[in-house]
Amino acid sequence: MNKGKNMGTKNNTALIILLMFTILINLDSYAATVTKVNTHMYEQTSAEISDLQETEKMGQSELHTENEPPNRIYVSKTKKELTLYVDNKEIGTWECSLGTNTENGNKEVEGDRITPTGDYYICVRNNKSAYHLSLGLSYPDKSDADRGFLQGIITQAQRDAIYSAIDSKRCPPWDTALGGHIMIHGNYHEGISTAGCIAVSDSVMDILWPYGEIGIKVTIGA
């Protein structure tokens, strides 16, 4: 009788040991799974943070390129003044003369004697100008070309040629019906208008010349 009881006790003990061993194995497997999941979550979060930081850097870079360039020229058509900025600091503002009919609106065609309005860039420099020194502007630009094409002033081929020149930062064609040869030049005389160019005194032109590099932005506004 005692022998049978001892056998039953041994069997129960073995069963308990087997059950505990099974539980330990399952716990190890669960811990490994949790560790793996947590590691994956950490790696994914790190990747998202890295991607966010890179996006922020790109955003800052894009924002920087959208700021005004450090060297630029601004022309006010209502005040008839030209302002030079160097390293984002105003160097000076001077009187200038504009096209005879500038007060009538924006330039549309060759010979209307109107100074255009818009954002342009210097595309050519002439140190042998009949007007002391001259800086040629990138008129007509893409918006001028679109308007001219829609109004039937220029052809599709001429519009495409203007687009190509602007994309390459070159001077656009100046021989279309939209006109061209818009310059900032010297030989300013108070009270005497131009055919559409922007005239300043020779002494002011001497100041502008070193900063008027190819590609410098020139805004002609109100």
Image (cartoon, rainbow, N blue to C red):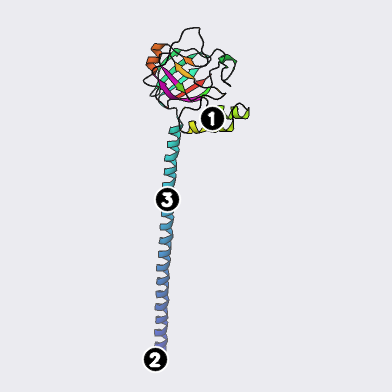
Seen in the picture, residue 8 relative to 28 is either above or below; the reply is below
Residue matched to label 3: 47
Label 1: how many Cα within 10 Å (few below 14, some 14–19, many 20+): many
Q: Nearer the viewer, mark 3 or mark 2?
A: 3
**Label annotation for residue 142:** 1
* Region rendered in magenta: 119-135
Mark 3 residue type: Ala
Task: Give the image location of residue 51, x and y in percent.
Answer: 43, 47
Q: Is residue 147 magenta?
A: no
Which amino acid does the dot numbered 2 rest on? Lys
Residue 196 to residue 26: above or below: above
Distance between mark 3 and mark 2 Cα atoms: 66 Å
Q: Is mark 3 on a helix, strand or loop?
A: helix
Examine the rendered structure and indicate whether residue 177 appears above or below residue 206. Answer: below
- Residue placed furthest toward the right: 151
**Secondary element at tag 1:** helix
> Disc 2 designates what residue?
3
Residue 85 position within the rendered picture, expressed as x and y whole percent measured from the top left = 41, 21
Q: In which quarter of the image is residue 52?
A: top left
Please, what is the three-letter code of the amino acid marked with disc 1? Lys
**Disc 1 to disc 3, how far (Cα)?**
41 Å
Secondary structure beneath label 2: helix
